[in-house]
Image: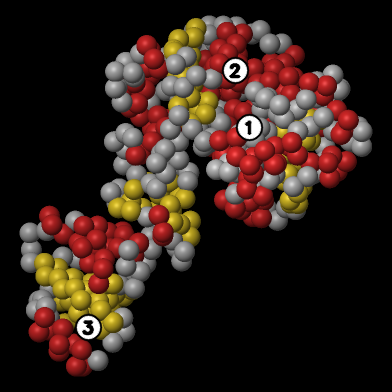
Amino acid sequence: MPLFFNFICSLKFLPMKNKSLVSITDFTREEQIHILDLAEEFEKKPTQKILQDYVVATLFFEPSTRTRLSFESAASRLGAKVIGFSEPGSTSVQKGESLRDTIKTVANYSDIIVMRHPKEGSARFASEVSEVPVINAGDGANQHPTQTLLDMYSIRKTQGTLDNLNIAFVGDLKYGRTVHSLVMALSNYNTTFHLVSPQLLKLPSATKIHIKENKLEYYQYTDIIDVIPKVDILYMTRIQKERFSDPIEYERVKNSYILRNSMLEKARPNMRILHPLPRVNEITIDVDDNPQAYYFTQALNGVYVRQAILASILGVKK
Amino acid sequence: MEKEETRKELVVSAIENGTVIDHIPGKVVFQVVKILNLSEVTDQVTFGTNLDSRKMGKKGIIKVSNKFFRPDEINKIALVAPSATLIIIKNFKVVEKKKVEVPDSVEKIVKCFNPNCITNHESVITRFTVIDKEDLKLQCHYCEKITARDTISFA
Ligand SMILES: [Zn+2]
């Protein structure tokens, strides 16, 4: 009887149970913090077989080895069975099956679906046709909320707080969905934003709205060196050549957004460098040995955060 | 005013009961017909385009007998005809006149402008939240991109 009572009680206090995570705004500020707190627990004790009775489906309609392995590692550490595909090549999707049918079928075989898809809005649509919750692992250029949460986790862990920080975003601020979601999320924490990008790749006004709505300060720069002494977090992103219609323009700007170890002399001692990875050449290798480089640990944090998300949505952790 | 009214009567006959949609920009009359799904209506529908109007130069007008639109139905036309006026007729008399209003949300009728949006690749009913009524900005419920007045098209 007490066991049954416990069960009822825990159900009552699980707002995230069965909730899909498509966009970072699907989780309230409190829910986001809850995920970060829980991830901290998993960092202390990563292997907890609490999902032994569950099947996690990972559907990757476009390859993303890094994200898929991070989710599968998270699920495995919790004892879940993992099914799915890493590219649609050998599946019925290739034969022209609709996303609706694929999702409805897989929902029969699993308790939760993690999906990545090249079309924007695909994850929202999947969450509406699926009988089980859906976690968006990237829908085209739109959202990648688990990346946002692991970024938030990394910021909080290195700075001890999410509040009142100076955060610089460097590189492609126009097309980088990672940047858009993180700016949106951080707008709830009284962040001061330092935006460093070529003229062509400035943060879109649709994202700036979130900064303005919260009456926060933001500064725009075209040179990375100016922001280094001012910030607590330096969030680097890659500038893709394909974004430039004029190759000469690309050649002209590309070197201005490369971070070298010699540039970090004036950095604050608490400053940490983040990058969503994969990196190409925007951070030189000599930065890796600098204790302020945090991007590899950031990727590791992704596993704890995804453990927390799986456990919360499946309702096995309060 | 009197004169214009009389002239209009000549072109498009009066109705006993129903709805008149007036002051539609001439170019979008057929779009309004489509948005309101008037091809499915079995009662009398008459419409005119390129009518002279002192206010707007050329205008269009649509009269639908025995039909009183719900606000959510009629407000959809504000997306293409924000200047339109709605006139409710009962017993040949005007009982109500009002302007159309851009609705808070739009379903089905608008196509998402984003070619990479799932709604343009699967059979998904489109859904938008109107985030700016004056400038007409519709945010797609799926891809979250914003379809604006200059990129709007109808499904
Ligand atoms: Zn869309």
Q: Do labels 1 and 2 share a chain?
A: yes
As helix, strand or loop, the secondary structure at mark 2 comes to: helix
Q: Position of residue A227 (x, y in %)?
A: 82, 43
Q: Where is residue A36 in the image (x, y as percent from the top left)?
A: 68, 27
- Please name the residue that numbered disc 3 is placed on: B52
Looking at the image, residue B86 sits to the left or right of residue B149; the answer is left
Looking at the image, residue A188 sits to the left or right of residue B148; the answer is right
On screen, residue A99 above or below B10: above
Q: Which of marks 1 and 2 is nearer the N terminus?
A: 2
Whether pointer 3 and pointer 1 mark residues with C-beta atoms closer than 8 Å, the reply is: no
On screen, residue B97 above or below A7: below
Chain bearing tag 3 is B
Q: Where is residue B44 in the image (x, y as percent from the top left)?
A: 7, 66
- Please name the residue that numbered disc 1 is placed on: A148
As helix, strand or loop, the secondary structure at mark 3 comes to: strand
Chain bearing tag 2 is A
